[in-house]
Image (cartoon, rainbow, N blue to C red):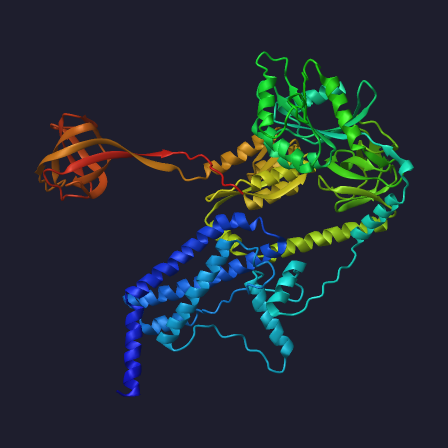
Amino acid sequence: MSEVSKRSNTINFIERKASSAAFRKLYADGMGLVEETAAYLDGEGRTEAKKLSRISATLYAAESMRLTTRLMQIASWLLLQRALNSGEMSREQMMSEKKKIRLDTSSAKVSTNGWEELPEAFRLLVKRSLRLQAYVQRLDQDLFGELVAAPMPAMSNDNPVGSQIELLRTAFKLLGFGQVNINSLIDEETAELLANEFEVELEVTQEVAAEEALIQDLSAARDAVEDEHLIVRAPAVAFLGHVDHGKTTLIDTIRASRIAGGESGGITQHIGAYRVETQQGHPLCIVDTPGHAAFTAMRARGATAVDICVLVVAADDGVMPQTREALQHAKAAGVPIVVAINKIDRPEANPEKVRNELSGMDLIPEDWGGDTAMLEVSALEGTGVEELLERVFLESEVLELNAHEDGPASGVVLEAEIQQGKGKVAHLLVQDGSLERGDVILAGEGYGRVRSIHDDRGKVIKAAGPSMPVEVTGLNELPTVGDKFYVVDTLDKAQEVAVERSRKLRQMNQIERQSVNKENLFEAVAESNKTVITLVIKTDVQGSAEVIRQQIQSMLHDEVEAKVLLASVGQVVDSDVDLAATSGAKVLAFHVSAAAKVRQAAERQGVEIHNFNVIYELLDYVKGLMEGELAPEVSESVTGHAEIKRVFKSSKIGNIAGCMVLDGTITRDSKCRLLRDGTVVFTGVLGSLRREADDAKEVREGFECGMTVKGYNNIEPGDIIETFKTVETARSLELKEG
């Protein structure tokens, strides 16, 4: 046999193999692996990835991109081969399309830093995809004589730097960064990963940033102060608990004022802090945190900014969902917990039930042999309140809380807002040192010289020491709730750090925008088919704006999305209306209003402005908007059955079915199905309906009638006409977990 004949027979054999049951199995295996991988990455893999270290998480993102790219290439090749086998494509068409496919996507080495930390299931998927790729490569080479691979960009032999740049670009694409240039930013972990990929040595040098240098200087100055210059400071105490369990009323009783009356629905809307003393003269700083679930982030910050947490639990309700959340925040902060069992004045109060429930959450009461103080109180009547405060102070003595009475102050931002007549206002908790009027402070991206200081009762003061909550003016920008603040030497130094923080924030945002992985690619595709509701949020304080945006962003659904275009502090102004008009957004105003001229402008432009005083009402409104965009759930309801006994032919109106109604009620113009031997042969609408010689609106069970089916004449005796109606039901919004 000639060499040509041998080659021809080999090709025929391979082609038969490519169109045989073996290929069908290969196709099924390949597509099955694609589905299995997608399910893993969108489900279990997403959860597992969140547990990884930064270096392994970066490797996971890069490798998942490689994995999905590899499987997409394999799937494309299999689909083309199937199209060729079925005759949907000619060989020439298939070869033309095949040139666009490559089958050479590599994987990271098992020796790469972070590889062993990757989930075992993920590593197995990578291994299986590589085996499948190798098999398809061999089959492709046997069939077509060459490995499927897109040509690499031409690189000049006399420019080795150009070659390296091209390699780097390819690597960046594999790592999920898309198009990169000399100005693109990467973090240290990604740089290390790239170095491992190219087997090059990487030396990372750390430049001491202005902020770090500032903190080091402040720490050194504080460490130089001898212990005898330290004072015992008042403990900062956070009151946490479920909504309506009496937190605010308890604080009101302690402060001997009625705060709750000024809050909508009796719910605390902002973080506040108050300086109080026990009857024994012991000072306490009470940090009040909002009780509604929407303020989880605020509550978390309240727990981390304090020394002791008081968990308020109503004796009549017992442990509730937000009780558990509050306890988690307190435990995460690592601070002592004192339980206030409130509302013992109510007839249905059951303190023992509360103790039992809390013991199941690893809070064992002291009188049960545990180490958690649980005191029974009535905020309404004042019963047990003083005992609670003294116990809190006793807990603080064990902690030995010390601070510098003098020197530059530092602390935490509790809230930030724009007040009419004052401008930008920051609510601060001084934790160390002394804050004085005229001091230069740095808080987040804001800085400035302190113009005024007010205490928690609104009184103007010249200075504030440790554990004192104050309201200050003078910052150029609103800080973020939870930011640390520092007193620094000069405005220039404060400006330098603030600018550096702003630059770093922009860089982080840029890196996040550059980072593309399989997860957000899938989400982007999914979101392309979503209905988008656009919103402009205006609030009275920065903390509320932050939390509202966060809560709305957490409302995840496959069909509809609420997108916040702007969330800022201050009244609704013309620019907000203009933004809403151009984007079709609604304006949601929380604890703020709009001037008459602004409202008139909104009416002219068709912009809706909605006002809210309670945050969960705002969130319920957004949820309602999203529900309104959901397609209704359509269901069928069968209304009756009729059997065709005779068929009458009419040249004018077509065949007429002489029927007996078997059950239900047949109504004129009803939707209907024609059933023959149990099989649906036509679906349409009834035409005429007659009872004896008269037109009829409906015919009930047990009566004879004549009817026609619009657009269908092929009816036969023995056929069953089934009538039905469709019912549209509004769907409730079932949000996904983020």
For residue 301, above or below residue 220: above
On screen, residue 78 versus residue 683, left or right, reads right
Residue at the front extreme?
A: 369
Count of all numbered marks drawn on residues in the image:
0
Query: Percent x, y for residue 257?
Result: 74, 19
> In this orientation, which residue lies closer to the viewer: 201 or 303?
201
On screen, residue 191 versus residue 419, left or right, reads left
Query: Percent x, y for residue 244?
Result: 61, 23
Tell me the quarter of the picture where residue 113 sits: bottom right
Asked if residue 416 shows in the view, the reply is no
For residue 568, above or below residue 263: below
> In this orientation, which residue lies closer to the viewer: 235 or 490?
235
> In this orientation, which residue lies closer to the viewer: 571 or 591?
591
Q: Residue at x 83, y 27 (%)?
A: 459
Q: Residue at x 16, y 29 (%)?
A: 662
Query: Percent x, y for residue 370?
Result: 66, 26
